[in-house]
Amino acid sequence: SVVTISAKGASGGGTGSGEIIRSDGYILTNNHVVLPAVDGGTLQVLFSNGTTADARLAGRDPLTDIAVIKVDKTGLPAIPIGKSSTLVVGQPVVVLGAPLGLTSTVTSGIVSALNRTIQVPGENSQAALLINAIQTDAAINPGNSGGAMVNCDGKFVGVPSAGATVPSESG
């Protein structure tokens, strides 16, 4: 149910992750993953079986960093949906995605905190605001964005959106 997304446009390109949320081709990801393709660029999806498909933007919300894309395929394996409201601090979680372009990567960790409010870079010099964010110690690297955080039942509970980094040697 987790895919790798390639976005290309006049200003460059990049890769990220997403998850199939409906068997008729709808895929959830982050807005910043699809951003290079917004103004006339291209989106391509790589499925776990190695096949690819062109995608189009179905909708996006830059202020919350969420986007939905659509491929013209049916019968796709939609990710089972869980409830993030049932998560507890210390609970194990798994993050699925394509960090650093490495498809089908799995990292694990715990829920470190709940209900975080995090400001992240957005588009056009506006910030995106992640409200009620789930903090985890599972490794999140560039390319994990838009992927899936799942509970130990394999149910989708969150979208990796931002990795924390130390801004300088002094912190």
Image (spheres, helix red, strand yellow):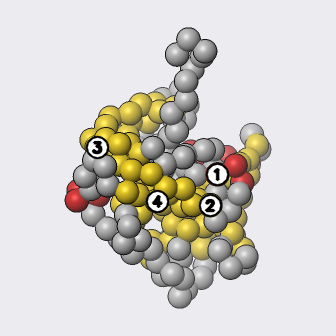
Report the amino acid beneath label 2: Thr
Q: Earlier in the sequence, mark 3 or mark 4?
A: 4
Q: Earlier in the sequence, mark 3 or mark 2?
A: 2
Q: Find disc 4 in the rendering and name its residue.
A: 94
How many other residues sit within 10 Å of disc 3, few (<14), some (14-19) or many (≥20)? some
Q: CB of mark 2 within 8 Å of CB of mark 1? A: yes
Q: Which residue is drawn at the image coordinates 52% and 39% (left, top)? A: 163
Q: CA distance from mark 2 to mark 1?
A: 7 Å
Q: CA distance from mark 1 to mark 4?
A: 14 Å
In the picture shown, does residue 156 fall above or below 144?
below
In the picture shown, does residue 96 fall above or below 53?
above
Q: Find disc 3 in the rendering and name its residue.
A: 114
Instruction: Report the disc number at residue 140.
Output: none
Residue 40 visible? The answer is no
Q: Secondary structure at mark 2?
A: strand
In the picture shown, does residue 37 fall above or below 129?
below
Q: Earlier in the sequence, mark 4 or mark 2?
A: 4
Instruction: Report the disc number at residue 105.
Output: 2
Q: Which residue is drawn at the image coordinates 71% and 57% (left, top)? A: 102
Q: CB of mark 4 within 8 Å of CB of mark 2? A: no
Report the amino acid beneath label 1: Pro
Report the amino acid beneath label 3: Leu
Q: Find disc 1 in the rendering and name its residue.
A: 99
Q: Which residue is drawn at the image coordinates 41% and 31% (left, top)? A: 119
